[in-house]
Image: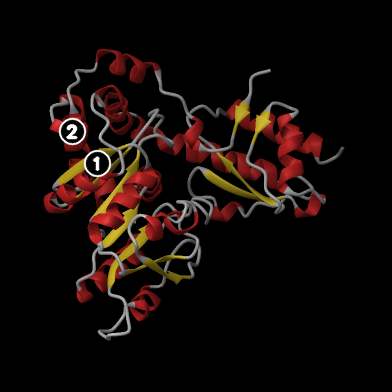
Amino acid sequence: MEVIDLRSDTVTKPTEEMRQAMYRAEVGDDVYRDDPTVNRLEELAAREMGKEAALFVASGTMANQVAVMAHTKRGDEIILGEKSHIYVNEVGGIAYLAGVQAALVTETEGVMDARVVEQKIRQENIHYPNTSLICVENTHNMAGGRVVPLAAMKEIHDVGKRHGIPVHLDGARIYNAAAYLGVEAKEIAKYCDSVNVCLSKGLCAPVGSVLAGSREFIERARKFRKMLGGGMRQAGILAAAGIVAIEKMSKRLKEDHENALLLAKGLNSLEGVSVDVGRVQTNLIMVDFAGTGLNGMQVAERLKQNGILINGSSSPVVRFAVHYYITPDDVKRTVEVVSKIIKN
């Protein structure tokens, strides 16, 4: 039985075109900036994001942490969402690595209220840390892949500009947001001063993210990347897949969104299973099994026995992630299996 892996869009394997590009990649020492394939990827990513420069890094977490380090000084405070990936899922790196503390904002559907963000900015006072960065996430992972509207992005960026505070965008899935909004990614990225773009999620590259921003910012970030052990030398083998990811795979994400909506509707039709279909915008689905009496761990274990993988949890609400390797037939089979396991 072929396994249907819905744990995350990080499970995607490189396409055949990527593998061929990696095999043929021209390489050099990237720490010396001699790797032509890495250089091409960085130039491509900078153009795509509408920024002056970009930096290839090992992961989205590294991109976010390097960005925080490059934007701030130790002892500063940064403003970010209480359910943001940077705060929840990056092992406390902003404190341990950058030495900054968090001023948290409660998001609504993944969106921070610009007025609340502005209220969180510290005034000049000997007792207070300096507010040096605002972080936004789009799409928002813990909000179920919700897209932050451009108007909300602009409002927060305007707050930053008024106070001289840069905005960093965790745009790990920025291409999913762009596909949903029907715009180029740079139309989202123009409302931030730096942006992390993940290549190894729905875009199928095996490794890496790209951090984009001004040339001055990227020069600072490059040094912090080296500090964290991110000088990957002949990284063109990996960057070659990243080029294919941006040029080809970013253009087909609507297919994933359509399959996610199909899955959401199918699961919502089952007794005891609830999905707010109207909230499904991209490739992530939050599914509530409370009506079945099962928690997420029980659902995950029963699905695994039937060749379907999800990440379980103690909560009855679990995430299903659709990606390039999930077909309409996989969606149909998943709905059928879920229907079976909740009856047994």
Question: Picture coordinates of residue 133 (x, y %)?
Answer: 29, 65
Q: Position of residue 339 (x, y in %)?
A: 77, 37
Please state which amino acid type lies under the numbered disc 2: Val
Whether residue 189 appears in this view of the structure is no
What is the basis of the colouring in this image?
secondary structure
Q: Is residue 92 left or right of residue 248?
A: right
User: Which amino acid lies under the numbered mark 1 shown in the image of this protein?
Assistant: Lys
Q: Residue at x 43, y 38 (%)?
A: 254
Residue 38 or residue 21, whichever sits in front: 38
Left or right placement of residue 285 versus residue 16 in this view: right
Please say if 153 is above or below 287.
below
Q: Which residue is mark 1?
A: 226
Q: Which mark is on residue 160?
A: none
User: Looking at the rendering, which quadrant does residue 201 occupy?
Assistant: top left
Q: Quadrant of residue 173?
A: top left
Position above or below: 20 against 156: above
Residue in view at x 24 percent, y 60 percent = 71
Label 1 near label 2: C-beta < 8 Å?
Answer: yes
Secondary structure found at label 2: helix
Q: Compute the Cα span from label 2 to label 1.
A: 8 Å
Image quadrant holding the N terminus, namely top right
Quadrant (top left, top right, bottom left, bottom right) of the C terminus: top right
Q: Please indicate, yes or no, whether residue 5 appears anywhere in the rendered image.
A: yes
Which labelled disc corresponds to residue 31? 2
Tell me what residue is drawn at x 20 percent, y 44 percent: 222
Is residue 75 depicted above or below 124 in this figure? above
For this rendering, which residue is in front, 138 or 167?
167
Q: Which class describes the residues within 10 Å of circle 1: few (<14), some (14-19), or many (20+)? A: some
In front of the other: 265 or 167: 167
For image coordinates 19% across by 25% down, the residue present is 37
Q: Position of residue 318 (x, y in %)?
A: 65, 48
Q: Mark 2 or mark 1: name the one nearer the start of the chain.
A: 2
